[in-house]
Image (cartoon, rainbow, N blue to C red):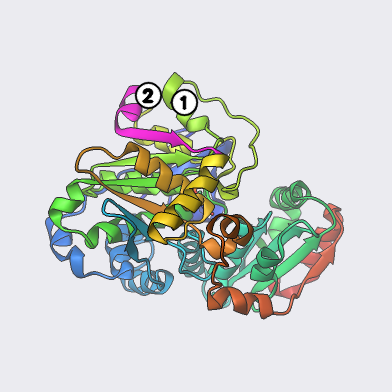
Amino acid sequence: MQFYSTQDSKHKSDLKSAVLKGLAPGNGLYMPESIPTMDEAFWDKLAGMTVGEIGFETLKHFFCPDIPEVEFKQLTADAFNFPIPLVKVTDKISSLELFHGPTLAFKDVGARFLARVMASFTSKGEKPINVLVATSGDTGSAVANGFLGVDGVNVVVLYPKGLVSNVQEKQFTTLGQNITAVEVEGTFDDCQRLVKTAFMDEALCEEMILTSANSINLARFLPQMVYYFYAVAQMSKEEREKTVICVPSGNFGNLTAGLIGHQMGLPIKRFIAATNINDIVPQYMKTGKYKPAPSVATPANAMDVGDPSNFVRIQELFKHDWEAMRESLKTEVVTDEIIHKTIKDVYETTKYVLDPHGAVAYKALEKQLTGDEKGIFIATAHPAKFPDIVEAEIGREVEQPERLKAFLKGEKQVENISGQYEDFKKFLQSNAKFK
Ligand SMILES: *Cc1c(COP(=O)(O)O)cnc(C)c1O
């Protein structure tokens, strides 16, 4: 399949260059040039399929034969290798728990898949692909763990010294193997500047292959459609048609994948997009005007986004028709106060422990469900990742999963550099494994 740019629909790329470039020229985002519909045979066998098998059947339309089918089958089985349970919370509402992967957050799904797609583009003897990521916390850990042990790909994570939490830092500095953590004297913006300067440094890019793994990469957002199909696989036909899925949204990549799934035939009733008080998209639904704003800090911090990068993809899916979009996609804004209260209330009435992001989606769903509709909210992070916020509301400790404890025991291994670009360049050039 070819992928076109949202900036210029005549600009098309094949899979490999769209994935390795990430961004299309002029800062466009890549979109699939057509969206397939799943056939009867798929729906007949869906109920018995694993997440990996669903991944193969749905995503092969976009990724094969550029990646040979036999190889892609293995790739999807390997990428989608952790459980994604659908857990009943109340009579009407269930939680699709996407936090059972390596870093206990849903970004593991996209990162694991992207890593394996990139690896399929390298072969023995060729130069390695080097992924540079600047992180203020969570992205670094999902990307590093997604790529851990993947042959032919190195990851360099840059983070601001002293400015990420202990748990976050341990999740990407203790890994070793093909992952290098670099502590930078400076802020997150400095880290981002170093990465951007490296990408634009033509001499450096002659010496080594540099690429990014951020959420605008099509191989990071597309695989997120898989769990929507997996959720309906666990329901009867009657239930599917009454189902409303609520997605806690920041950059809107997760929702974009769900909407593409919907166009492929996902038999649910509708989607709701829930945000925290960074309400750029809900405002757009009201006024028809898209007005980016500086982001505001909230307890659901992975959704603190003032200019959602994937929103342009959603506009493409609705052919830039504002009326059509607000007709079929509802939004809801949840304030900080209500996030805290929802964690408390849901725990008291059901014993279910929400994380702040899941709480946004739960509340939006509860408010908007009508008649005989049934709701699913996407639980994007494990509550143990936000112990201070959650424990204050539920009045007890949150159990730490073994995986989190193991990270905390690991030994930190880092390189140190100043915020000067020349230092970063020297570090890359003096390391034979990047070439
Ligand atoms: C990234 C993230 C989100 C937002 O997902 P988008 O695809 O950016 O809308 C929600 N919850 C958590 C925990 C996240 O890490």
Is label 2 in a helix, a strand or a loop? helix
Position in image of residue 133 (x %, y %): 65, 57
Taking the spot 52% from the left edge, 69% from the top edge, the residue there is 122
Does the magenta-highlighted stretch encompass residue 426? no
Quick one: label 1, few (<14), some, or many (20+) residues within 10 Å? some
Q: Quadrant of the C terminus?
A: bottom right
Q: Given contact means CB atoms under 8 Å apart, are the residues at marks 2 and 1 in contact?
A: yes
Q: Choose the circle earlier in sequence order: 2 or 1.
A: 1
**Taking the image as drawn, is residue 76 in sight?**
yes
- Residues 228 and 132: in front is 228
Taking the spot 68% from the left edge, 79% from the top edge, the residue there is 410
Check disc 2 and give the amino acid type: Trp
- Residues 382 and 12: in front is 382
Quarter of the view holding residue 326: top left
User: Which residue has dot 1 on it?
Assistant: 284
Q: In the displayed structure, does residue 409 sit left or right of residue 307?
A: right
Q: In the displayed structure, does residue 68 sit left or right of residue 299?
A: left
Is label 1 in a helix, a strand or a loop? helix
Taking the spot 43% from the left edge, 53% from the top edge, the residue there is 346
Q: What span is in magenta? A: 323-335
Position in image of residue 102 (x %, y %): 52, 71
Quarter of the view holding residue 174: bottom right
Position in image of residue 391 (x %, y %): 58, 60
Quarter of the view holding residue 272: top left
Quick one: label 2, few (<14), some, or many (20+) residues within 10 Å? some
Check disc 1 and give the amino acid type: Tyr
In the image, residue 282 sits, relative to residue 80, either above or below, namely above
- Residues 79 and 272: in front is 272
- Residues 150 and 140: in front is 140
User: Which residue has dot 2 on it?
Assistant: 322
Q: Which marked residue is nearer to the observer: mark 2 or mark 1?
A: 1
User: Which dot marks residue 102?
Assistant: none
